[in-house]
Image (tube, grey):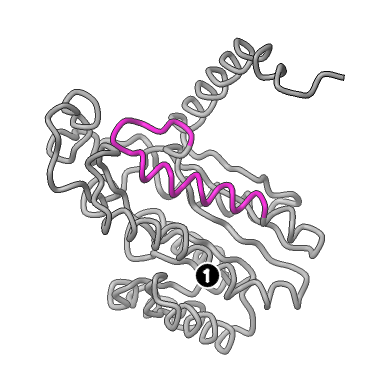
Amino acid sequence: MTTWLITGCSTGLGRAFAEAVLARGHHVVVTARDVSRVQDLADAHPQAALALPLDVTDQEQVSAAVAAAQERFGAIDVLVNNAGYGYRAAVEEGEDEAVQQLFETHVFGTTRMIKAVLPGLRERRSGTIVNISSIGARISPEGSGYYAAVKAAVEALTLSLRKEVAPLGITAMVVEPGGFRTDFAGRSLTQAAVPIADYADTAGRRRKEHDTVHGTQKGDPAKAAAALIEAVESKEAPFMLLLGNDSSDGFRATLDALRTEVDAWEKLSRSTDFDE
């Protein structure tokens, strides 16, 4: 039996993760900014689940949640940094305050959680840190530049972290979901308030009022949760777990396009060393 701490459990993949881990008989610390939205999980599993309020942008709440989890269950074995939301805007449209909040939640919130949990993992020389990213970090669609940027930052951070903690018996991994049938494209999606007409045919096509994807995504959250648990419990968890056919297809297409471009410019790239 292990103890998982999952951020952002009120809806979507976070809730699916929590439900699946509880169904496997593990302990789960279920968190949300509004704890009343996850209290039902704790009520249904009074011995195995602990519901806590947690805003990952608040250091005091981060510290308090980790301390409460350790007091209740003794240790945290798996941290899943799932809390977050979407933001759509052409790069020029992005509002400074909104962009700063996006980074505060996804990048610095993830970092706060990692730093709060790592001392316990290091002491026991075991544990797993899972950072939820997005295929958006790879394909960077129009209108999602800022969202892609925060997820790309999380991925780069995780790769360095993985190398740092592997010798200590700790695993760090990234999950890149594609489109799943959650409220991510609904309630959890924000956007710039003032669109710029020149971007109507690029970023503008992906604004909420033009989006027809919500509720039709191919991804099944329950299957995503089962896949995550399988990866975490495997003997050697991958650095990157892609979830969904669209994620796998998008990743491979981007990889192929990058490889083609690197090959095309390789001669120039290799021309910049000192002559010997």
| Magenta segment | 138-160
* Residue at mark 1: 113
Q: Is residue 243 left or right of residue 129?
A: left
Identify the image quadrant of residue 206.
Answer: top left
Identify the image quadrant of residue 36.
Answer: bottom left
Q: Is residue 132 left or right of residue 52?
A: right
Q: Residue furthest bottom?
A: 71
Above or below for 185 versus 60 = above
In reply to whether residue 217 is colored magenta, the answer given is no
| Residue 89, position as x, y percentages in the image | 25, 41
Identify the image quadrant of residue 30.
Answer: bottom left
Which residue is located at x 42 percent, y 57 percent? 106
Above or below for 244 versus 25 = above
Which residue is located at x 46 percent, y 35 percent? 244
Pointer 1 local density, CA inside 10 Å: few below 14, some 14–19, many at least 20: many
What's under tag 1, amino acid-wise? Met
The quarter of the picture where the C terminus appears is top right
> In terms of secondary structure, where does tag 1 sit?
helix
| Residue 75, position as x, y percentages in the image | 64, 80
| Residue 250, position as x, y percentages in the image | 47, 27
Which residue is located at x 69 percent, y 49 percent? 237
Q: Residue furthest right?
A: 276
Q: Is residue 113 left or right of residue 178?
A: right
Seen from the viewer's position, the closer of residues 112 and 211 is: 112
